[in-house]
Structure formats: structure tokens, C-alpha cells
Image (spheres, rainbow, N blue to C red):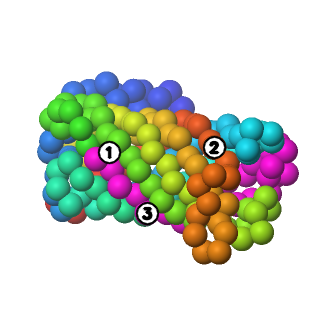
Amino acid sequence: MRLATIAMTLAALLLPAARAAAQVESGLHELGVTGSFDRGNYEFTARNTRIDLEGHYGFFVTSRIEIGGAFSFSRGEGDVNNGEWVSALSGVFDWYVGDTSSRAVPYIEAAYGQLFNDPQFLEEPTFASVGPGVKWFFGDGGGALNLSGFYRRVFHDTGGAPNFATGRDEIGAKVGVSIFFGR
């Protein structure tokens, strides 16, 4: 049974895939899960390492622009988080660049959101992130493996507005899978 599962997975990944243009199109929905690992610096003094688990939804406005939202849970270790669970809610914008008819479609992602229950901050801070990625499409039905990197800046909120001078810088990598539906 285990060998059959491995063989089916390899076959799905190695068989010729449908053209990505048939999967990245206006009106399409994306649902996915992503895991990430990042390393951060807090004002160049404290360091933290964090692992995130994220669920996301996206809607393709055009064949190159996707908007959506994400909800994540993370647990950090180090000088900053002390092993506490933190959640985040964010809006996400993906811009697909390059040849959208290939199997691997590169994109640039930007997100803006808010952290909840972060023990480092007295208030719930906001964050912004940006980074490149690639979605590697497989099968006929609309699935993809998602590989990306990111830079995230967590802002100290003061008086309802982000303070761009203080906060935490994080750099990390994400790996996930997505399904596409609604054609």
C-alpha cells in the first residue's frame, strides 16, 4: 500500500501536466495550505525563529492578478516569542509574471495584516511582507506545489499608526500545496 501511494504521487508529479494557462485564468479560485520557516531580528538585539502554518484563499481577477486572504498560526522560539502561539490575519496580492503557459509560473506576493496574541507587543501589531515565488502546476485538475521566499516587517503600533522605525525584520521560506476550482 505504501509503495502504491509513492508510485501514484511520483506519477502525478512526473506525467505531463496541463498547460498552466489553462489553470491560471480569470474567475478561478485557489485554496491552499502553506508551511513556512523564518528567522527574525528584533531591533538588531533579539533573535527569534518561527514556524508558521497558513491557510489561504485567492480569487483570480485576471490571469495575472490574484487577491485573497490568509490566516496563520505560528510558534516562535528564541529571545522574543518564548514559545507562545501567535495568529495572524492578512490580505494578499499575487502578481503572476513571466510565461503563464508554462508548468512553473513565477509570481511576486505582497501582504499586509495584523498579528494577534504576540507576547512581545502590548498591542496587536501590523506587518507587511513581500517576496518572490513559483507555483509548479501538476495534473489536469488544477493543483500546484508552491515554493516562495519572503521578507516581513512587523511594526510597533503607536497611536493607531505603524511606526516604521521600530519593529522586527523576518526573512523566510514557504512550501505549500494549492487546489484550483471554479472554472
* Mark in the foreground, 3 or 2: 2
Residue placed furthest toward the front? 165
Which of 156/94 is in front? 156
Q: Amino acid at mark 1?
A: Gly
Q: Residue at x 39, y 27 (%)?
A: 10
* Mark in the foreground, 3 or 1: 3
Q: Give the side of residue 141 with respect to residue 5, left or right.
A: left
The residue that disc 1 covers is 143
Q: Give the side of residue 4 with respect to residue 78, left or right.
A: left
Q: Amino acid at mark 2?
A: Asp
Indicate which disc, 1 or 2, sits on the residue closer to the N terminus: 1
Q: Are marks 3 and 2 in contact (CB under 8 Å)?
A: no
Q: Residues within 10 Å of mark 1 (few under 14, many from 20)?
A: many
Q: Residue at x 65, y 66 (%)?
A: 157
Q: Residue at x 68, y 40 (%)?
A: 40
Magenta-tinted stretch: 72-95
Q: Position of residue 135 (x, y in %)?
A: 34, 38
Indicate which disc, 3 or 2, sits on the residue closer to the N terminus: 3
Measure the C-alpha gap from mark 3 to mark 2: 19 Å
Q: Is residue 171 visible?
A: yes
Q: Position of residue 167 (x, y in %)?
A: 67, 52
The secondary structure making up most of the magenta span is strand
Indicate which disc, 3 or 1, sits on the residue closer to the N terminus: 3
Q: Amino acid at mark 3?
A: Gly
The residue that disc 3 covers is 91
Q: Residues within 10 Å of mark 3 (few under 14, many from 20)?
A: some
84 in relation to 8, above or below: below
Q: Residue at x 76, y 63 (%)?
A: 121
Measure the C-alpha gap from mark 1 to mark 2: 32 Å
Secondary structure category for the residue under label 3: strand
For residue 45, which quarter of the picture? top right
Q: Are marks 1 and 2 in contact (CB under 8 Å)?
A: no
